[in-house]
Amino acid sequence: MKTIALIAHDNKKKEMIEWAERNKAVLSKYELCGTGTTAKLVAESTGLEVRRYLSGPLGGDQQIGAKIAEGKIDVVVFFWDPLQAQPHDPDVKALLRIAVVYDIPIATNKATADYVITSPLLSESE
């Protein structure tokens, strides 16, 4: 079963929750994980099980990056806020970099996430 990581900066958490609620049926077919508060909020709002890592500023982005390197995460949905400075910006860039290095689809906004979640490639086995 493929694993989808869910991450959202503070100003994008509401958007992530709404997106996850709208896509609950599809998301229920996959293992889910996410950083701190995002994982907690998505789990609470959808009733789906979401493995929770640390919050992004406390190392959650790095934990997810490590799981990508281990081949344990297949897709990242990361609603990041490009207009807000992040104190852990180097970690964010490292996560984006590792996803590219390992050729992992990474959706950084709702439109791209909608394309990824509806792609027939998502349900294909390795």
Image (spheres, rainbow, N blue to C red):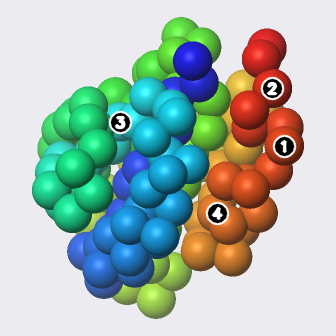
Mark 2 surroundings within 10 Å by alpha-carbon count, few (fewer than 14), some (14 through 19), many (20 or more): few
Residue 101 visible within the image: no
Sooner in the amino-acid sequence: mark 4 or mark 3: 3
Mark 3 surroundings within 10 Å by alpha-carbon count, few (fewer than 14), some (14 through 19), many (20 or more): many
CA distance separating discs 2 and 4: 17 Å
Q: Name the residue under label 4.
A: 113
Sooner in the amino-acid sequence: mark 3 or mark 1: 3
In what element is the residue under mark 2?
A: loop
Mark 4 surroundings within 10 Å by alpha-carbon count, few (fewer than 14), some (14 through 19), many (20 or more): many
Q: Mark 1 points at which residue?
A: 120
Q: What residue type is labelled 1?
A: Pro
Which of the 4 image quadrants contains residue 122?
top right
| 107 versus 11 height, above or below | above
Which of the 4 image quadrants contains residue 37?
bottom left
| 3 versus 38 height, above or below | above
Question: Which residue is rendered at x = 59% and y = 24% of the image?
Answer: 2
**x, y percent for residue 102:** 72, 26
Sooner in the amino-acid sequence: mark 3 or mark 2: 3
**x, y percent for residue 17:** 33, 70
